[in-house]
Image: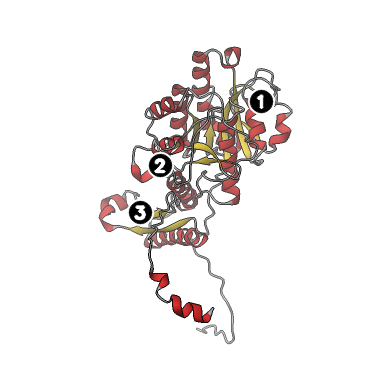
Amino acid sequence: MTTTVFHGIKTNLLTTATTAITSVATAVIGMVCTATDADATAFPLNTPVLINDVRSALAKAGTTGTLSTALAAIADICSPTVIVVRVAIDAEGQDALVTGANVGGYTGLQALLTAEALTGSRPRILGTPGLSSEAVVTALAGIAQKLRGMAYAHMPATDLADAITMRANFGQRELMPIWPNTGVGGADVEARALGLRAYIDGTMGWNKTISNVEIPGVTGTDTPVTWGLDGDSTDAALLNNAQITTLIRRNGWRFWGNRTASSDARWAFESAVRTSQVLQDTIDDACFQFSDNDLTVGLVRDIVTTANAYFKKLKTQGYIIGATCWYDPASNQGVDLANGQLVLDYDFTPTAPLEGLTFNQILTDKYYVDFSALLQTA
C-alpha cells in the first residue's frame, strides 16, 4: 500500500469554540407615559413602541400627559433607543388609583416585559416619568429586577424630610431614588435621568455612574437644595446619606449621588449593579451557542476560556478592575455532570466611583529650613 507523501509547506486553518464576546446593549430606555391626544397609530395604548428618532416621535406625542415632556427632556440630551408604553388614565393622572393601576399593572410596566419579543430590544434604563407614587415605584423596581435594568424614580415628596421617609420604603438594588424635581416639574427630572444614563452609556461607559455629569436643559429645581463640595451637613449630604440622588448647580446642573436603594452594602453603587447586570446578560447570551452540545472537557474549557477572554477585554478597557471564571470540582459531582448539569463560577470587581476625597492639610515650618540658601540662589 502506497502512503501519500506531502513534500512542501501548507497551512491548516483551525477553528476553536472560543468566541469573542460583545457586551449587551445597555442604552435602551423603557418608560411608561400618558398622553390622551397622542397619535393612536404611533402610540397605541398598552403596547411597547420602539422609537429610534426621539425628535421625530415628538410630533406625534401630543401635548397632554407626560409623554411629550419626557421625550423633549430626553431629546435635550441625546437620541437613544426608547421603548414607550402609553397608558390611559382618568383626567391625565388626577385619579391616583387609576394611575397606579394602569402604570404599575399589566397595561403599563408589565408590558415592558414583552418589549424584547415585540421590538427586538430589551429596555434596561427604566422609569415612569411624572407618574411616581409609592405603588408605582414598587412596581417599577420589580420590573427592573426582572429585566436586569436600572430604575430611576423621583420621590414624590413635599420636602426633604418626606423624601427621606419615603426612600426608606425601598431596598432594591435596581432602584435609584431622586429628589427634588427640576423647575419644569412633572415628568422632567426622571426623563432627564433616563436620557443622561443613556448618554453616559454611549459616551463614557455603563460603569460610570450618573453623578457629576452636566445635564443639558435644566435651569433650576422646584425645591432649593443646599450643597457644598466640602459640606457634610448640607441638604445634598443628607439626601446622599439616605441613598437619594439630588440635583446641584456647579458648572451647570448635575445629578449628585452614586447610590442605589439597596439594603445590601455590596450593591450600594449604581456602577456595581450595572456591571453585574451586564456580565450576567452578556455571559448568558454568549453561552447560548454551547447549550445542548456534548458535555466534554473541551466544551468546558471553551466556555471558561471564552468568559475569561471577555473579562480580560473589559479590564483592559477599564470597565472592571478584574474578573475570573473557573471550574470547581466540588460543585460538579459525576452524577450531576452525567445528568447534563454543569456549574461554573466567576467573580468580579467593579469600578467604584471616587465618591469621597480627603486631603490632610499639615501646617509646617520645614520649608523655612533652607531659607538662607534660597536667598543666595534667588
**Mark sitting earlier along the chain (3/2):** 2
Q: Nearer the viewer, mark 3 or mark 2?
A: 2
In space, the residues marked 3 and 2 are separated at their CA atoms by 44 Å
Q: Residue at x 59, y 86 (%)?
A: 8
What's the residue type where badge 1 is placed?
A: Phe
Which quadrant of the figure contains the C terminus? Answer: bottom right
**Crowd tier of the residue under label 2, counting other residues whose Cα lies within 10 Å: few below 14, some 14–19, many 20 or above:** few
**x and y percentages locating residue 191 in the rendered image:** 59, 33
Q: Which residue is mark 1?
A: 43
In space, the residues marked 2 and 1 are separated at their CA atoms by 46 Å
In the rendered image of this protein, does residue 353 appear above or below residue 123? Answer: below
126 lies left or right of 77? left
**Mark sitting earlier along the chain (1/3):** 1
In the rendered image of this protein, does residue 104 appear above or below residue 332? Answer: above
**x and y percentages locating residue 10 in the rendered image:** 59, 80
What's the residue type where badge 2 is placed?
A: Asp
Q: Residue at x 28, y 58 (%)?
A: 329
In space, the residues marked 1 and 3 are separated at their CA atoms by 44 Å
Q: Nearer the viewer, mark 2 or mark 1?
A: 2
In the rendered image of this protein, does residue 315 appear above or below residue 235? Answer: below
**Helix, strand or loop status at disc 3:** strand
Q: Which residue is mark 3?
A: 344
Residue 129 lies in what quarter of the image? top right
In the rendered image of this protein, does residue 203 appear above or below residue 198? Answer: below
**Crowd tier of the residue under label 1, counting other residues whose Cα lies within 10 Å: few below 14, some 14–19, many 20 or above:** many
The answer to whether one can see residue 256 in this image is: yes
* 3 and 2 marks in contact (CB < 8 Å): no
262 lies left or right of 15? left
Q: Which residue is mark 2?
A: 232
**x and y percentages locating residue 221 in the rendered image:** 57, 31
**Helix, strand or loop status at disc 1:** loop
